[in-house]
Image: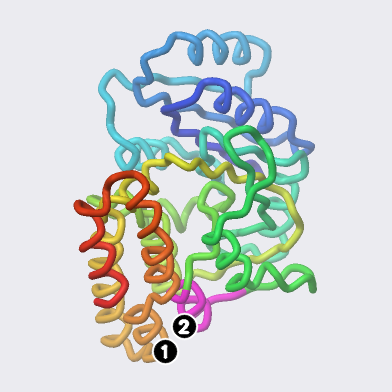
Amino acid sequence: MSIDVMLPYYGDVDHFKKAVDSVVAQSFSDFRLIVVDDGFPDPEPARYMGELAARDSRVTYEKNEVNLGANGNYRKCLGMVEAPTVVVMGADDIMLPGYLQAVHDGFAAQPDAAVFECGVAVIDENGVPAKSLADAVKAWNSPLSDPNGRKVLGGEDLMVSLMHGNWTYFPSLAWNAEWIGKIGFREGLDVVQDLALLVDTISAGGKMVIDPTLAFLYRRHSASDSSVRALDGRRFAEESRFFAGEAKSFADRGWKKAARAARLHWTSRLNAATLLPTALKAGKLCEGGPKLVRHIFG
């Protein structure tokens, strides 16, 4: 079973190189790495990838003539997939050497599964282990905390778990290419597009393979796009619309527990509450404070 690693890129060059190097260093060798540069204004990624591609035929680099934005570039990447399994990797994250082997083994054990998640550790901008409150909540809410080996989840129980709090790290997910190609990313979402894809997949009957083995390092930035959006309330405005829509959808299909969990979305509310002091310190309380409060109590 071959695997396509799609890497939509725009950002820090050094982190990008480490991400690329971690893919090339995988113990599982039957993969393609396809980097789609969304017009980052630096010639170094093209130079670096050109040299790498000359040595390794599994590696491809393409640069968009026009910046598509995160959502657009992700959708372009999905249109380039040929392998039966695909990973849409973050351009600053790191695969541990056995990650793709774990993906292969997980899908081999459950061929009809739609998505795979492994154990993930969080690092900061400097590569140092880090854990924010959000990561602590993810760990508390996650079935990955169960050390009893690989399992398969799906249906309303999995949906309830994700509505309580999205414990997955999207760049670490591997997908059945047929499933992700059929479902695709919803247009118009910037912050919750990853959770929306999971919701749509599970709603359509897709199952998730869970393997608690640590195989991926997720890099969390203090000034990421989602954290900036969170400080002025934009993130939570999108989340509020999303959860309200999903609560109605679940109720319509008779998933009462999932509908209740979506209406509560308590970890999202907790996240907003923890950002009030940060917004004050950043001088964004007047702008974002009322939006954060509405999300907490709305």
Q: Which mark is residue 293?
A: none
- Quarter location, residue 66: top left
Residue at (64% x, 35% y) in the render: 31
Q: Where residue 72 appears, x then y in whole percent?
A: 30, 39
Q: Nearer the viewer, residue 83 or 35?
A: 35
Q: Is residue 107 left or right of residue 201?
A: right
Which SS class for mark 2?
helix
Tell me which segment is drawn in magenta.
153-164
Above or below residue 107? Residue 77 is: above
Instruction: State the colouring used for the structure image.
Output: rainbow
Callout in the foreground (2, 1): 1
Q: Is residue 254 magenta?
A: no
Marks 1 and 2: in contact by CB < 8 Å? Answer: yes
Residue position marked by numbered label 2 in the rendering = 156
Q: Earlier in the sequence, mark 2 or mark 1?
A: 2
- Using a 10 Å C-alpha cutoff, classify the residue at mark 1 as few (fewer than 14 neighbours), some (14 to 19) or many (20 or more): some
Q: Where residue 128 appears, x then y in whole percent?
A: 68, 39
Q: Amino acid at mark 2?
A: Glu
Residue position marked by numbered label 1 in the rendering = 257
Q: Nearer the viewer, residue 19 or 175?
A: 19
